[in-house]
Image: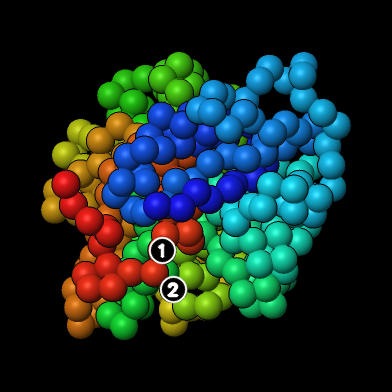
């Protein structure tokens, strides 16, 4: 077993859940995977701290020191990974990109749940990773605990996937089902927020923007698209959707916000409201569940569904990615170093 230092950028709900899981499950991760990731530094926009190396969580923010340049923090901690859990907002996009590019060029792997800089700096991130011999993993940005990114990156490799059909936004699915059950749009959104499914501002979820973003990233992993060049065409959930959702329910069908991308229609992602019926894996979704269908003409459709839509779900996806980039070289079946 070897220890692996991680510098964590962002200490909101996802960052805290990531830190807490590494603290509580470190021994088990070490036993199973031969590596024990440890958060050696936590950074926010203005301050940072070096958590104690004795299993205790980071101290209260009042005791944190002023933010050092990232290169200094990486060197001071001997970090192998930069984990990004900052909000996917335009305000932090450029800084997130700058940090990730600097880390990658220095040979530090990047694990991110932040989407904004992936959309704007995809090529620059890839070039920096090649230059530094480092890896980027984005599971937390493509569906939280749903392993859609893993399937797109390696799971359907060589199977001839030609299109993606997905409901990658749990909030939209939950709201549409509540509308069908008789809720108003405002009541459905409020319930999603009360349960911790929807953000305080659900605009990206209801407009289709978030579903399009995740599908853009999946398409880039599948077919090498430049994410920043992808055009999106969106049909959102609004007050006019209430009647459509209820009419679909009366007919025994379910309305879904479906994102699609096709290899033969490059750099285009569409999100449309579709009626789905029994037998369709998107029809079967319950509550905030998500699903992605990879259509492989010769191998057959391959579907992944479920996955927790929550800060913990995104944090666990980051933990999985951290293990992926730091685990010792494997032989044999390549699963876990040992059992028992």
Residue 320: image location, x then y, percent: 41, 50
Label 2 environment density (alpha carbons within 10 Å; few <14, some 14–19, many ≥20): many
Image location (x, y in percent) of residue 336: 27, 58
Callout 1 environment at 10 Å: few (<14), some (14 to 19), or many (20+)? some
The disc placed on residue 190 is: none
Under circle 1, the secondary element is loop
**Residue under the image location 82 percent in, 28 percent down:** 65
Which element is circle 2 on? Answer: helix
Residue 260, how many percent across, how many down? Answer: 42, 63
Q: Is 146 rendered above or below residue 105?
A: above
Residue at x-position 28% and y-position 73%: 331
Q: Is residue 80 above or below residue 244?
A: below
Residue topped by disc 2: 222
Specify whether 214 is left or right of 163: right
Measuring from the top left, give residue 159's x and y in whole percent. 28, 80
Q: 71 or 158: nearer the eye?
A: 71
Q: How many marks?
A: 2
Name the residue at 32% across, 40% down.
Answer: 28
Tell me which corner region of the image, top left, top right, bottom left or bottom right, holds residue 248: top left
Front one among 326 and 89: 326
Q: Quadrant of residue 180?
A: top left
Please state which of residues 24 and 200 is positioned toward the viewer in this rendering: 24
Residue at 56%, 24% in the rendered image: 57
Question: Disc 1, disc 2: CB below 8 Å?
Answer: no
Residue 27 in view = yes
Q: Name the residue tied to disc 1.
A: 328
Nearest to N terminus: mark 1 or mark 2 = 2
Question: Closer to us: mark 1 or mark 2?
Answer: 1
Please, is residue 23 above or below residue 141 in the view?
A: above
| Distance of label 1 from label 2 (alpha carbons) | 26 Å
């Amino acid at each position: 077993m070897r220890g692996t230092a991680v510098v964590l950028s962002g200490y909101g709900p996802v960052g805290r859940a990531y830190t807490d899981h590494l603290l509580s499950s470190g021994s088990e991760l070490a036993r199973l995977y031969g590596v024990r990731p440890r958060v050696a530094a936590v950074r926010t926009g203005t301050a940072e701290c070096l958590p104690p190396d004795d299993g205790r969580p980071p101290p209260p923010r009042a005791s944190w020191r002023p933010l050092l340049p990232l290169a200094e923090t990486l060197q001071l901690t001997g970090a192998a990974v930069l984990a990004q859990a900052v909000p996917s907002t335009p305000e932090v996009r450029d800084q997130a990109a700058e940090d990730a590019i600097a880390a990658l060029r220095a040979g530090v792997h990047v694990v991110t749940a932040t989407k904004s800089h992936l959309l704007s700096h995809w090529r620059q991130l890839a070039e920096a990773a090649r230059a530094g011999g480092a890896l980027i993993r984005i599971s937390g940005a493509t569906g939280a605990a749903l392993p859609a990114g893993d399937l797109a990156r390696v799971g359907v490799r060589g199977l001839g996937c030609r299109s993606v059909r997905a409901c990658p936004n749990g909030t939209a699915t939950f709201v549409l089902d509540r509308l069908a059950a008789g809720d108003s749009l405002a009541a459905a959104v409020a319930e999603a927020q009360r349960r911790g499914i929807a953000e305080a501002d659900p605009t990206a979820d209801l407009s289709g923007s978030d579903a399009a973003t995740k599908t853009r990233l999946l398409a880039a992993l599948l077919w090498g698209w430049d994410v920043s060049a992808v055009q999106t065409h969106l049909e959102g959930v609004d007050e006019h959707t209430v009647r459509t959702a209820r009419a679909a329910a009366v007919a025994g069908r379910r309305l879904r916000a479906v994102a699609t991308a096709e290899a033969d229609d490059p750099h285009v992602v569409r999100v449309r409201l579709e009626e789905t019926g029994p037998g369709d894996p998107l029809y079967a979704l319950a509550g905030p569940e998500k699903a992605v269908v990879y259509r492989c003409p010769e191998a057959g459709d391959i579907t992944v569904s479920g996955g927790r839509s929550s800060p913990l779900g995104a944090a666990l996806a980051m933990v999985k990615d951290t293990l992926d980039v730091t685990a010792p070289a494997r032989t044999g079946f390549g699963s876990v170093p040992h059992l028992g």
